[in-house]
Image (cartoon, grey):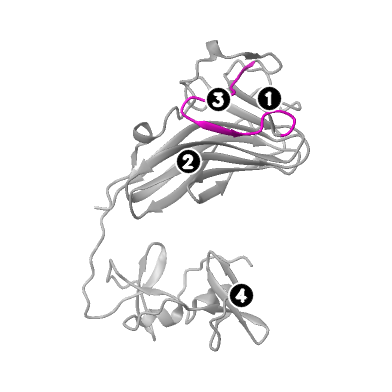
Amino acid sequence: MVASKVSAVSTCWANYFGYRCCTNTKNVVYSNESGKWGKENNDWCGINEKEDPNCWANKFGLSCCKTTNVEVLKDKNGSWGTENDDWCGIIKGTSVSPTTNKPESDITGNYIKNPSFEQDNINSLAKDNTRGAFVAKSVVGWNLSGSYGTSGYSVSDIMTSSTKATDNNFGAPGNPSDGKQMYYIRDAWNASTASLLQSVTLPAGKYRLTLDNKCVTTSSHTAYLVAGEERVTLPFNKSLPTKWTTTELVFQLTKETTLSIGIKVEFGSGSGGSILVDNFRLYGSKSA
């Protein structure tokens, strides 16, 4: 089931996706990012779970406003505002506590070690003569995990603008997106997993983690940018792109948290999975 937001207020949140809300069941059959779903009369229905007796908007699958009382829309049900890119019901005669956020700032240097792989000393690494790169069995500041060799990843390199090729005629990687070095990992022939992670401790706040990447596959391989339990898929191409893609992952912490950030890779059977990354950046804003 695929659902997407629309910009209109309905009498039931499930109506946004062409369904009605459940009237006789609370039994959860399926859950996704939109909410929890049940079944009535052999059809899907949305389940309203969190109902506040003081919030009239709950019966429509929405919350009441906590930080605004600015009316954006009024219908027969009441007055509506918006919070966190979603509708909220305005309770007349109540006060709200506006939340202000500090501007987002680049905090990479405070938390991420070796974000652009510049701290890896290529002069001390063995040469990968096949690619014109440098073999990285470990990466400064990062925890490289997975099985090296025919049962896992076959290549782990620090590359530069002088690197002449990646693999399978994908061509030279071009220039790093930041600095003079970048990191490359490639699969062997068997299904396996690998990761490049480091642990960071962050205070409560909203964060945005970004990564420049060039990924190529001729088989069933997947890679993710991760922050704790949150992750987003890196895009793969059939041939090595000339331009870098910047992938971002937004996450929120309600308290100081220690979590792992970096990339995770799932290699399928067969060759052809190549992941080139550079320039991890972390941006943050604390609630005032």
What secondary structure is found at the residue carrying circle 4? loop
Residues drawn in magenta: 133-151
Q: CA distance from mark 1 to mark 4?
A: 46 Å
What secondary structure is found at the residue carrying circle 3? loop
User: Which residue is denoted by mark 4 in the rendering?
Assistant: 29
Task: Please tell me which of labels 1 and 3 falls first in the chain.
Answer: 3
In the image, what residue occupies the spot 32% across and 46% down? 203
User: Which residue is denoted by mark 1 in the rendering?
Assistant: 166
86 above or below 212?
below
Q: CA distance from mark 3 to mark 4?
A: 45 Å
> Where, quadrant-wise, is the N terminus in this rendering?
bottom right
Contact? badges 2 and 3 (CB < 8 Å) = no
How packed mark 1 is, by other alpha carbons closer than 10 Å (few <14, some 14-19, many 20 or more), is many
State the mark number for residue 261.
2
User: Which residue is denoted by mark 3 in the rendering?
Assistant: 138
122 above or below 110?
above
Which amino acid lies under the numbered mark 2 shown in the image of this protein? Ile
Contact? badges 3 and 4 (CB < 8 Å) = no
Residue 174 shows in the view: no
Q: CA distance from mark 2 to mark 4?
A: 32 Å
In the image, what residue occupies the spot 48% across and 26% down? 178
Task: Please tell me which of labels 1 and 2 falls first in the chain.
Answer: 1
